[in-house]
Amino acid sequence: MFKTSRIGQPRLCQVRLITAAAAQTQPRTPVKREGNISDAFISLSSTERPPLPPRFLDIKKALVAGHEHRVVDSWKRLLERLRAENRTIAKEGPAIIPNIDFHELDKGLTTFGAEIRERGVAVVRNVIPEKEARAYKDEIEEYDNPQVFELYWSAPQVKARAHPNLLKAQTALMRLWKSSDPESEISMSQPLMYADRLRIRQPGDANFALGPHIDGGSVERWEPHGYGRGGVYHRIFEGSWEEYDPWDASTRVPAITNKYNGLGACSMFRMFQGWLSMSQTRPLEGTLMVNPLLQLSTAYVLLRPFFQPIKHVGQVSDDEYLSNDNWEFAGASMTSELQGATPGHGQELSAVLHPHLDLKKTMVHMPEIRPGDYVAWHCDTIHAVDQVHQGKSDSSVLYIPVCPVTEINAEYAARQRAAFLAGTPGPDFPGGKGESEHINRPDYAYLCSHADPSGLRAHGFEKLNPTAEDTNGAKRVMELANSILGF
């Protein structure tokens, strides 16, 4: 147990011991400059996207060397499948998003598990009582008056992350993943907390309108010392995208997703990104949009840089432009380009760069969402937000992803714990004094008053306990994580 003094603050000696132990086991990570969400994406920043250096051409050639014909055949199969699936998505719209009720969580995941794995997204209804979730927003506005994003340690964020219902939902969602290697050092039996931002978006707002994108780095997906360390996308690059399993956690453990210390880039392995709603929203009311074709969209994004059109837009009809016959393996004319990928920034997508995804029709809104609903989407899911909030009331969410126990995640959790005590942003986020001078900022005593042992474990203030279901690798990483966290 993390010891406290009579006034409810962590004992100073204990803080020093626990943070010192954490510091000794962690690599030195540069403190990030101050900034905001716009710095995380080229399209939102004032930065001009430079051409990628020649080494990325070498990487591309190495990925497909000796089996180019298999990659070409797989591309043709992929385009055929996309055409059929795109029509289904355009027809069904938000109804295609799986919904389960928190109070029937186990039953819902059993019934809709395969559907969630296919779509890469789920809405878990009634995770937190509606009245309680609505009150979060009022409390945030008393603490500060944000339009979007740059708060991390407000009382509602701290309470929501530690809420036993949310932690139960996160634990259940992690069971959708599997580990093909029982020796892989990952535990999915309990989540670690990741302190992300929040959003309170007012009607008519068109600021920070993120288009289709994927978080978790960009160029790292092709790099041998990025996602290649675990062979995450090996099946796709060898021409067998049908055999690629987006839900195999063991391949993700060694992956490096933030090689370039990007502002807002995530160093932790988030199985799901997610948010908890504090308001009622409908489609077009400043809500989330996703492309619910997880396996296919991932394969397309990764293979797109190897192919080029023979005839370009304007020279032929749209159907002819997209037809298999109009696309060829780039071969000798291949460049270093990785469409939409920029070091230190998120992966962005567009109709121009990724035409076969038909994003205008396949980016579907969440169905109607109420306060207390939790929306989670796979870490590789293409997602966006409404360009303009056309509703009549605010669209407000707390970003709360789902993170398992791994060595990298434990290292981050230790640094993040120190940031919580100091009131500064977590290590992934733009530096500066953050909320360190905010009045009524929650402290350790406040967390203890709103968290049970599972909530304190998620925040790095209680020892992690292995479960009967944990594999050998999971038990080892739990012991390692406790050492990193100072227990």
Image (cartoon, helix red, strand yellow):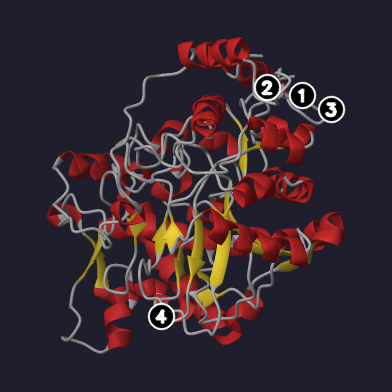
Asked if the residues shown at circle 2 and circle 3 are in contact, with their CB atoms under 8 angstroms apart, the answer is: no
Q: Amino acid at mark 2?
A: Met
**Residue 338 place in picture, x, y as percent:** 26, 53
Which dot, 3 or 1, sits closer to the camera?
A: 1
Considering only order in the chain, which callout, 2 or 4, is on the residue closer to the N terminus?
4
Horizontal side of residue 378 vs 165, given as left or right? left
Label 4: few (<14), some (14–19) or many (≥20) C-alpha neighbours in 10 Å = few
User: Mark 3: which amino acid?
Assistant: Ala
CA–CA distance in space, label 4 to label 2: 44 Å
How far separated are the C-alphas under marks 2 and 3? Answer: 13 Å
In space, the residues marked 3 and 1 are separated at their CA atoms by 10 Å
SS of the residue under disc 3: loop
Identity, as a three-letter code, of the amino acid under mark 1: Asn
Label 1 neighbour load within 10 Å: few <14, some 14-19, many 20+: few
| Circle 2 crowding by C-alpha within 10 Å: few under 14, some 14–19, many from 20 | many
Q: Which residue is disc 1 drawn over?
A: 465
Give left or right: position of 394 versus 62: right
Number of numbered discs overlaid on the protein picture: 4
User: Residue beneath label 4, please?
Assistant: 360
Which secondary structure, mark 2?
A: helix
How packed is label 3: few (under 14 Cα within 10 Å), some, or many (20 or more)? few
Mark 1 vs mark 4: in front? 1
Q: Residue at x 63, y 77 (%)?
A: 367
Q: Tag 4's secondary structure? A: helix
In the image, which disc is placed on residue 468? 3
N-term mark: 1 or 4: 4
Q: Are marks 2 and 1 in contact (CB under 8 Å)?
A: yes
Identity of the amino acid at label 4?
Lys
Q: Residue at x 32, y 60 (%)?
A: 304
The quadrant of the rendering that contains the N terminus is: top right
Q: Residue 188: in sight, yes or no?
A: no
Q: Which mark is residue 478?
A: 2
